[in-house]
Image (cartoon, grey):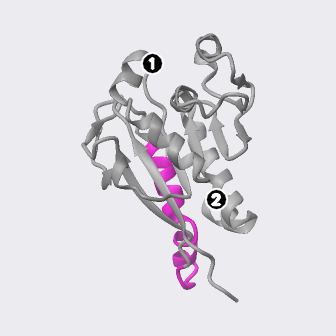
Amino acid sequence: MSTPRMIDVTVVLVHGNFASTTVGPLEVFHAAGLLWNTLQGQPVDARFRVRTASVRGEPVDSAYHLGLVPETSIELIEATDLIVVPAAGLDFDACFARHRDLFPWLRHHAAKGAYVAASCTGAAYLAEAGLLDGREATTHWATAEALKARFPKVKWRPDKLITEDRRVLCSGGVYASIDLSLYLVRKFCGHEIALQTAK
């Protein structure tokens, strides 16, 4: 039996992020095939290779002043299978201006076939990049109306916990980032690995 190919995941760090939407997915993907196996005394079978990257490789501050230091910058990521964008901020104009180099990078990797996932208000970054045009997407219920007005080409579904539409995925509120991560583990690795990771 052949060994499953490692899935390359890039967790993007942005200024003003809700740290749990960065750290939660990071831990879930690292744990898949590793933590359960270790606890059961089985050989480690890690399924994901996870990297963190910020726009320029610089440290970022979270919404509650927890500093996060990335491994690299997005421009040094040549290929990735999955990109995870965290929830960040309600002042979309300021967020977009500060992270303007993120949008062409997201479009580039999506065009190369990468899955792109966003938690909560992170969906706004995907919408600004044009990745949600004509697609179904969810976001935090309190920002849904503002995002509908700003991005009318998106089929906003804030009533859903998770949406998936042609390799682009979104989750609702901040803490749904764990649900989204486990959903992605199941998608890439199957139900049993997802269940073990959740346990």
Q: Who is closer to the viewer here, 106 or 175?
A: 106
Residue 1 to residue 61: above or below: below
Residue 51 to residue 160: above or below: below
Tag 2 or tag 1, which sits nearer the N-term?
1
Provide the major secondary structure of the magenta segment. Answer: helix
- Amino acid under disc 2: Val
Q: Which residue is mark 1?
A: 92
Quarter of the rendering containing residue 58 = top left
Q: Who is closer to the viewer here, 103 or 120?
A: 103
- Could you tell me if residue 125 is visible in this image? yes
In magenta stretch: residue 28: yes
Q: What range of the chain is rendered magenta?
A: 22-44
Foreground mark, 1 or 2, reads 1
Q: Position of residue 28 (x, y in %)?
A: 53, 57
In magenta stretch: residue 88: no
Q: Position of residue 192 (x, y in %)?
A: 73, 68
Badge 2 element? helix
Which numbered dot is residue 8? none
Name the residue rendered at 54%, 33% in the picture: 174
Separation of residues labelled 1 and 2 (CA atoms): 30 Å
| Few, some or many residues within 10 Å of mark 2 (<14, 14–19, 20+) | many
Left or right? Give the position of 125 relative to 164: left
Q: Which residue is mark 2?
A: 185
How many numbered discs, if any?
2
Left or right? Give the position of 141 relative to 20: right
